[in-house]
Image: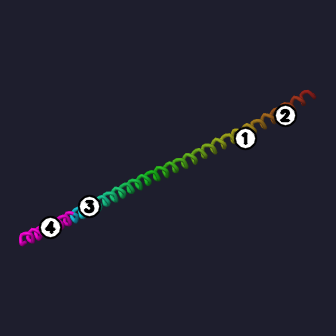
Amino acid sequence: RALALAAAEWRRVTEEQEGARRAAESERLLKETDAAVVRARREWEEEQGSARREAEAEAARLRMLHDEAARRLEERQVAWAAEAESRRAAFVHEVQQAEARQRQLAAEAESQRALLDEQAAE
């Protein structure tokens, strides 16, 4: 009977130790899992932050390129407008010169006609 009680006590102690060992192992695995989750989340957040910073830098670069292109376009438009105005002014000047020459030639022709009329009358 003492042997049976000792054996039962031994099984109980052994089972308690095994339970304690399993509990300790479960606790260790839980802590490792928690740590892995924390590390993975931290890495993910760092990657997201890095990707966000890269995207923001790219957006800033594209805004700068857009602003530069808009500035150059505006400069070209101003230059084209100035060139067009210069050509228009030159054309107007040529037309005015042609009109003045036409008036001069008409006056000379009238003068010649009057002179010829005078000579014909004599």
The chief SS type of the magenta part is helix
Q: Return the residue at label 4.
A: 17
Based on the displayed image, in which of its 4 quarters is residue 19 positioned? Answer: bottom left
Region in magenta:
1-25
Residue 19: say if magenta: yes
Q: Label 4 vs label 1: CA separation?
A: 116 Å
Q: Which of the two discs, 2 and 1, labels the residue nearer the N terminus?
A: 1
Describe the element under mark 1 as helix, strand or loop.
Answer: helix
- Mark in the foreground, 2 or 1: 1
Q: Return the residue at label 1.
A: 96
Q: Label 3 vs label 1: CA separation?
A: 93 Å
Q: Is residue 25 above or below residue 79?
A: below
Describe the element under mark 3 as helix, strand or loop.
Answer: helix
The kind of residue tagged 1 is: Gln
> Residue 120: image x %, image y %?
91, 27
Q: Label 2 vs label 1: CA separation?
A: 21 Å
